Amino acid sequence: MSPALTAQPTLSLEVAPGGVFELVASATGFALLTSAKACMVDAGSDRCAGPITPTFLRLGSRLEPVQVEPFLVGERYQPATIGWGLSCEGEGHCFALAGTSDAPTPVYALDLPPRASAFAAPLPRQPPADAPAVVGTATLASGQPYNQVASALSEAWLPARAAIRRTGRLSPGWRATKPAAACTWRELLGPVDPRKKFA
């Protein structure tokens, strides 16, 4: 594959599950309609304390956020409940429809020209500098059929040295560097026995 065609991660957004998602091309890149919290520019740690609402994002050719417009509609600029019908024409002039939960439901036609915005993209928060991070992986075993797995929920890093095979016993090299939550194991193709637990 040519290096020019290699996929690279460029954008990560925190969006509401089950919300709207529409992506269309524009003259300068792309336009995205999705549901997310309203985030303010230069608002510190609480910059994304706004309500969840349909949100328009203008993206550049490399998917970088250029313009963010939460759908605040009506005389009181209340958050819209639904948004749909995103389209872009000409030099990036975009349009969309929005509605609220009022009954009867008013429908708003939103004009979204390129302009400066006081809102920021709903980017994920960066973890603390001392947060656990994966620095490497290694294959512990291969070529043998495994029908049981180990799982753990923990705020501490655990070395992946527990290879549970059909016997259901932990390998001797397994050690936890810090206290962790209860771990469970189960057969992938058999019934689950909740009594089979280890700490």
Image (cartoon, rainbow, N blue to C red):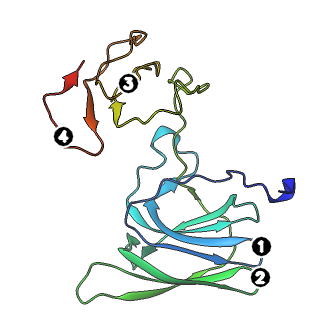
Which numbered mark, 4 or 2, is in the foreground of this view? 4
In front here: 178 or 41? 178
- Quadrant, the C terminus: top left
| Mark 3 → mark 4, Cα distance in angstroms | 25 Å
* Residue beneath the point at 53% across and 20% down: 130
**Mark identifier at residue 28:** 1
Which numbered mark, 3 or 4, is in the foreground of this view? 4
Which residue is outermost to the front?
144
Q: Earlier in the sequence, mark 2 or mark 3?
A: 2
181 left or right of 94 in image: left
Q: What crowding class fits label 1: few (fewer than 14 Cα within 10 Å), some (14-19), or many (20 or more)?
A: few
Q: Position of residue 98 (x, y in %)?
A: 43, 81
| Mark 1 → mark 3, Cα distance in angstroms | 43 Å
| Mark 4 → mark 2, Cα distance in angstroms | 58 Å
- 44 shown above or below 102: above
* Residue beneath the point at 72% across and 79% down: 92
Q: Earlier in the sequence, mark 1 or mark 3?
A: 1
Identify the residue under disc 2: 91
Identify the residue under disc 3: 155
Q: Amino acid at mark 3?
A: Glu
Identify the residue under disc 4: 192
Q: Position of residue 67 (x, y in %)?
A: 64, 64
